[in-house]
Amino acid sequence: MKKFLSQFSNWPISIKIIVSFAFAMFVGSLILAMPFSQLETSQATYFDHLFGAISMVAVTGLSTVPVAQTYNLFGQIVTLVLIKLGGLGLITIVSAIIMQFGRQVSMKEEITLQQALNRNDMKGFRHFLLNVVKYTTIFEALGAFIFMFKFIPLFGWGTGIFNSIFLSISAFNNAGFDNLGTSSLQDFVAMPVVNIVVPVLIILGGIGFSVWFDVAKHFKQFRSAKSWLDIKGTYRHLTLHSRLVIKWSLMLILAAMVIFTLAEWTNPDSLGGLSFSGKIQAIFFQAVTLRTAGFSTLNFAEFHMFTLVAFTVFMFIGGSPGGTAGGAKTSTVALVVKLIVTEIKGLTNINYKNRTLEMDIIKRALVIVVMFILLNFIALSLMTIFDEDVPLQYLFFETVSAFGTVGLSANLTATLSRYSQTVIMFCMFIGRIGPITIFTALGNRDRRKRDIKYATGSILIG
Amino acid sequence: MKKFLSQFSNWPISIKIIVSFAFAMFVGSLILAMPFSQLETSQATYFDHLFGAISMVAVTGLSTVPVAQTYNLFGQIVTLVLIKLGGLGLITIVSAIIMQFGRQVSMKEEITLQQALNRNDMKGFRHFLLNVVKYTTIFEALGAFIFMFKFIPLFGWGTGIFNSIFLSISAFNNAGFDNLGTSSLQDFVAMPVVNIVVPVLIILGGIGFSVWFDVAKHFKQFRSAKSWLDIKGTYRHLTLHSRLVIKWSLMLILAAMVIFTLAEWTNPDSLGGLSFSGKIQAIFFQAVTLRTAGFSTLNFAEFHMFTLVAFTVFMFIGGSPGGTAGGAKTSTVALVVKLIVTEIKGLTNINYKNRTLEMDIIKRALVIVVMFILLNFIALSLMTIFDEDVPLQYLFFETVSAFGTVGLSANLTATLSRYSQTVIMFCMFIGRIGPITIFTALGNRDRRKRDIKYATGSILIG
Ligand SMILES: [K+]
Ligand SMILES: [K+]
């Protein structure tokens, strides 16, 4: 064991991350498969537990069996642990391993870690980690506390408190799991507490830790602001990254709300049947959950084909980097959009707020987007072989949901063939590990040696 | 009129191209709508003629009414003229206009023209154009001559000769139109002449003029080659571009054949019913036609969902630049693949055959691919609103087919709503004009003035 650990510490850090994730998923599936984790009425096979464990660590939320009808209290606690592991990222554990072995982080590994964490500097990394854990716990505790006011009257003391904690952790980690039943949060479609607190937790978890600390650094200034102008002035002191991410997150939520309103307002099977205030709540909730949370208060199988297709864009983009959300990430897509706009204008430098962005990062953003599209497409093609009778829009929605670790489904996951479910497992795993980690995993060997520059060659395109 | 022409000559050349294409489509639609162009039994409305004219000039081949049952001999000749205009590209005409006005091509316009034509140098441009017209005519005449051996016995002298010319021009220009009936070339599924000559014409038209001339330049060497090694040696003297394009064209045809064989070999409604030799012919024909020709010898509506979804990749990629084919283009996609592979390897320079490729062209290739995907997606989303009852895979196949100016359809075009048909018209137009022309159209005004370089800013992605 000691020998293994010492060997493990010599692996490239990106491989460590992948192996750790896979290990957590596997161990999780074994524990969930034990009789002492399950209700006596559980019908789940090992495949279901493996699917669930992958989905939990990948904080996706898709599942072939409902948590509430499969796992007992112990099993549900295991679920929470797996979600926490996935949400904070095994990165934390990996870096802890490194520190424990008293080994200095090498320059190359430092860069990988930065990329994995999406942090710009490694100074005070331990301090950063402690802060992440601290604030995460505070937010989750606050969320749980508020839910208790509704859930204790509903479920009684014990279950009420536990369900509140479960929902809060799941929401903050963008996990999308619940232990309330088989239809996500559809029973709470018009309960304001759920429709405000859950989205707030989702957004806080998904915006990325670096944005928190940036905002926290300017918190005093924000608090002492006396006018809208003061707030705007302070906002300008945030990092380029924070501003880009905040702007895009707002834009995407608004865009999803507009599209959802236009498409579903009169659909009797979705928004049509709700009161005005219920409609507004449901529109807001669904727009936020798309950004990789995965809870739903409406039945997605009843939406128009257009709504499902349009929603894939938001699931594809997902949340912001360095948080609990999945997807290609807001900033990645923002850079791609900036590049396209720059090209259309016939300009060369890609600028944002009086700063020119590095071509290297733009190129990487483009590659991530194209890779994501490609992998999504391959997964979808495979599923059309295995489940030919399912309408394509449901299969499409399901793959994008799995890749973005969103967890929304048109009630499809459980009814898919085992082959397609296996495809979905891979999608969730790859979606969570993230393209950057994979790139680095494959690419950080003898980089300089093979990097040859020849005379320039020319190819015609277009 | 003279005033208009003199004003026209001052426009940026990319705008000229767009306006000329639109003008040809509009005039074409008017002529086709005249009673003297149509059969007495024609039921077509002006919308159908407009759709047809756009499809002809965009050399797509989708249509809402069959040519054979709508247009008389004169109308069919108009069809051929529109296809020739689209296939050679109005670029020719535009450059003729420029020359006629005795105006020197400015440096900036020269670059645009190069991009539009995908030629590396403008020396001997007139000579190049003449050669293009000459060889195009030779290939079309040869094709028509061979078809006559089959078509004269089948249709009699007059109709046989005309139909041979029609099919040859349509095939060479990757137009996909036929004047034989309502089911493309399905009657000829097992006729070797059609299954060899049509694909050869498609490939010759779609490989790009620059590749022809490159191969022609080394023709003597190829002819005097005494061994496989000699051929390989001469092949190495071809330009980087020619080799990339030839390799990718072969690879794509082979890949499409393998996928089609695996997916449809036993499907009784497609390959299953054919003899062994019929199967081989149909597999080859369908693999080639995907690369934006648009003829079919099988009923695409009978294919598996998987086949349709997988085929969209080939239609998306399309043919090679600077020829009659559409799509994102082989070389564009090849560069994107090279970039992704380079990133995965963790390298910086993108190399091909001992040459390093310019980052500028790679960036543009990525933008074209992402733009194409985006536009395809928008078009598809719109069609899901207007034709909600059509299975998504048929709508998806139709949009990609229109964008790539492929012209294949799961028998859908005529039955779509007018709204969706309008979307298809835009797809064909944009697909033919090509993203580069659009970029240049939007981007070539006061380029230097606004191109500001700021201090470097940093954004976290992934
Ligand atoms: K999720
Ligand atoms: K075509």
Image (cartoon, coloured by chain):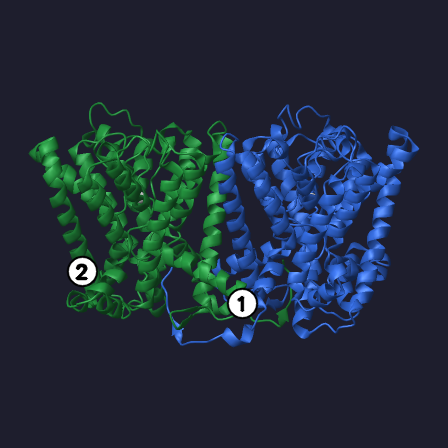
Chain colours: A blue, B green
Q: Nearer the viewer, residue B358 or A13?
A: A13
Amino acid type, label 2: Leu
Residue for point 75% across, 73% down: A103
Classed neighbour count for the residue bearing mark 2: other residues with Cα under 10 Å, few (<14), some (14–19), many (≥20): few
Residue B242 sits in quarter: bottom left
Task: Say if B250 sits above or below A177 in the image.
Answer: below
Give the residue pinned by disc 2.
B130
How much space separates mark 2 and mark 1, taking CA atoms? 39 Å
What percent of the width, then of the height, locates residue B444? 42, 62
Residue B405 appears in the picture as rendered: no
Task: Say if A188 sits above or below A207 in the image.
Answer: above
Amino acid type, label 1: Asn
What percent of the width, then of the height, locates residue A194? 79, 36
Q: Secondary structure at mark 1?
A: loop
Give the residue pinned by disc 1.
A349
What percent of the width, then of the height, locates residue A314? 61, 45
Residue for point 13% across, 36% down: B151
User: Disc 2: which chain?
Assistant: B
